[in-house]
Image (spheres, rainbow, N blue to C red):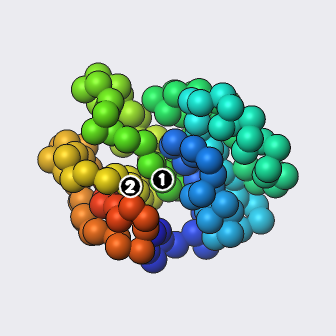
Amino acid sequence: MFGNLDFSDTKVVVELGSGKGVFTHEILKLIGPECKLLAFEVNKPFCDKLKSEIQDDRVIIINDSAEHFGKYLNQYQFEKADHIISSLPLALFSLELKESILQNATHFLNDMGHFLQFQYVPFDYIRLKKHFGNVKLRFSTLNFPPAFVYRCML
């Protein structure tokens, strides 16, 4: 699902919408020993479950809205995220919340970083193009259910 995303020099990855941790576990397999993963999930029971399952010093599980991730980057002394991986259901969010998340993503993403958005409906391509200079869309049949994967760069 992550394609050929390069995690070799990555210092911090932000995951938006960790859910039950499917992507969280995969990200942890890819990042180096010095990299931090800030995993955001608004659902407290999911956060509690992730905290009990994942005993890894590289991950910080945060029970807060994805739109506040910039505050936490600063709190943990990171200026920008090297990569942002989102499985948030943007199509279900209000326009204001969607815009807030995407504005933060462009503001807090490293110039060479990637913003990956996984969705099950292809509704946000034009919105992503308004925020990112380069947006590539592919369809992954390896995921169940199959998903659209947006790879965005500034």
Mark 1 in CB contact with mark 2 (< 8 angstroms): yes
- Residue 33: give x, y in percent of width and height: 77, 65
Q: Is mark 1 on a helix, strand or loop?
A: strand
**Is residue 127 among the parts visible in the rendering?**
yes
Kindly identify the amino acid type of the residue bearing the numbered disc 2. Phe
Q: Distance between the residues labelled 1 and 2?
A: 8 Å
Residue 85, numbered label: 1
Image point 52% across, 42% down: which residue? Answer: 17
Q: Quadrant of the N terminus?
A: bottom left
User: Which sits earlier in the primary sequence, circle 1 or circle 2?
Assistant: 1
For the residue pair 75 and 1, the one nearer the viewer reads as 1
Kindly identify the amino acid type of the residue bearing the numbered disc 1. Ile
In the image, which is nearer the foreground, mark 1 or mark 2? Answer: 2
For the residue pair 34 and 57, the one nearer the viewer reads as 57
Disc 2 residue crowd, few under 14, some 14–19, many 20+, Cα 10 Å? many
**Is residue 103 among the parts visible in the rendering?**
no
Image point 44% across, 49% down: which residue? Answer: 87
